Image (cartoon, rainbow, N blue to C red):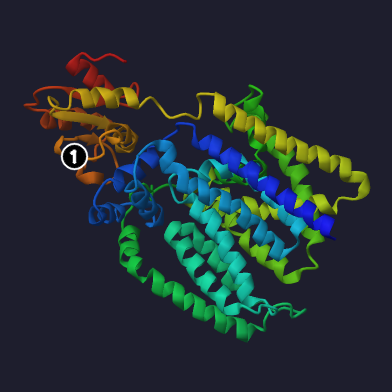
Amino acid sequence: MTRRLDRHHLALLGTMIVAAMIRLAVCLVPRLNIDEGWSYDLCRNPWGQALWYLQKDRNPPAPYVLLKLWMSCGSHDEFRLRLPWFVLSVLAVYAVYLTVRRLFSPQVGLLAAALSSLTYLQWEYDTWMRGYVFLTCFSLLSTVCYLGVVERASARRGRWAAGYTLSTAVLLYGHYLGIFAVMAQGVMVFVHDPQEIWLRRRERLLWLLACWAGVVLLYLPWIPMLLQQMTRSSGRDLGAQGLPTKALLVALRFLPLVTGLDNALPLLGGASTWFAPSRVLLAVAVTAVYGALLVLGARSLRTRIMSFRLLLALLMPPLFLVALIALKLPELSRVRYYMPYIPFAGMLLGAGLLALPRRGRAVGVVLVALVVLVNLGVVASYLRGPFFRSADWLTPARFARAHQAQASVIVGFQNHMMHAFNYYYARDQVDYDISRLHYPCYHYAPGYRGLPEIHAWPEEFPNIMRRRLKGIQGVLLVLWYDAGSPVRGWFAQRFGMVDS
């Protein structure tokens, strides 16, 4: 028994080391994107101004509070800024193990944690300076604490209740999709338990009502900002029509994304777009093979009735999101929205591997080896290749800094692109007041950082810019990301600019 425990703990330690090494390595890759540039740009403002800008967006505040506090502690180097996300992303892998061990068994927990440690989708978005790691980590910690509150054999229920209240509040402050985990937990309160493994429904309802009341109290300060965000349509095409074909494609991509096998063909030099027939065929094959493994795992776990039902409830949101894509909101097809369900699907895949008959164990080894090899190949490509790295924002940033004394205007197209530029512009001179420069920007988003808000179609842009640039003296720096458009053509004709 002791030997088994030692092997088990060594396997868990090895999994955590692999997870930490992968995440540390990718954090060293300079890959600042426009969303992270927006996070940095917002957090350079005073607290009151940052919250004012945040209410014009559609994100809760926890990631930005963390980043702003961390930025005040020292250097703004990109790797250093990612360190809190690195810590939370490693903690998320351990939270996978804790959750699955409590739901099912330590063996299934190890397999699910191993998948989470390797899968590209999870380590990529968990290390973004955004709210995705809050969604992954705290939905799992909230579920662990929830089980501690509702299980009959919980001697420390008060501590579990405090942990559940706090972790759920942080989850909702971190990402709005966290509400799906809370809804799944709420549904389970009213489910009949024939084996009486959990507390009776009335008793656990009272405990959970107390916890949820605590969550509401902790969340009250943010509710006015949430209501203001809900009244804005920034970043949403509310007039869009549903796309059933895209919904079907997203559903077909779920298991390839969970396992990381959707990257197999690009690694081998094959098709890189998801509409390519070869990638669709790959998705069908992965869904058939690993879907059978998932069903086998589900069948093997049905003896744990309440745990199994909770897992199914936690896996329902992807189906809901796919339905919304088909009906009204195609923007929900972004793959990062499906990242937090990797651990829960990994539970079923791990259980399926353990449930394979003796004759099928060789097949199980091949399936596991395939997942490991493809994901390690993605890590190697990530570290060596240029595809994942950020654009060369440093060159224009150095140019702007070199001419900042003479510059009277910086013109940028697509305000979101300007966020990444601003990071490199301000990184080495944190106290420099960039707001004294005038920023006319071509964009459809709110005027973040007090920038002028210009809502215009490309054909309307020349007339607007003529008025804006009237009387401009000195250096004009132009950044554009819409090659071939009337915007670029107008600047080329007006100022004789060429690509560089």
Residues 454 and 106: in front is: 106
Quick check: 240 above or below 161?
A: above
Q: Label 1 amino acid?
A: Asp
Q: Which residue is the site of mark 1? A: 433
Quick check: 7 above or below 218?
A: above
Mark 1, Cα crowd under 10 Å, few <14 / some 14-19 / many 20+, is few
Query: How many discs mark residues in the rendered view?
Result: 1
Instruction: Name, please, the residue furthest toward the left.
Output: 471
- Does any portion of residue 226 appear in the rendered image? yes
Residues 178 and 458: in front is: 178
- Does any portion of residue 486 appear in the rendered image? no
Question: Image point 60% across, 65% down: which residue?
Answer: 143
Which secondary structure, mark 1? Answer: loop
Which image quadrant: the N terminus?
Answer: bottom right
Question: Image point 33% across, 34% down: which residue?
Answer: 417
Question: Image point 31% across, 24% down: which residue?
Answer: 485
Residue 321 position in % (x across, y down): 54, 54
Left or right of 268? Residue 441 is left
**Quadrant of res 47:** bottom left
Which image quadrant: the C terminus?
Answer: top left
Instruction: Name, please, the residue furthest toward the right.
Output: 359
Residue 329 position in % (x across, y down): 47, 50
Left or right of 190? Residue 385 is left
Residue 60 position in % (x across, y down): 39, 57
Question: Image point 11% across, 22% down: which residue?
Answer: 474
Residues 248 and 191: in front is: 191
**Quadrant of res 437:** top left
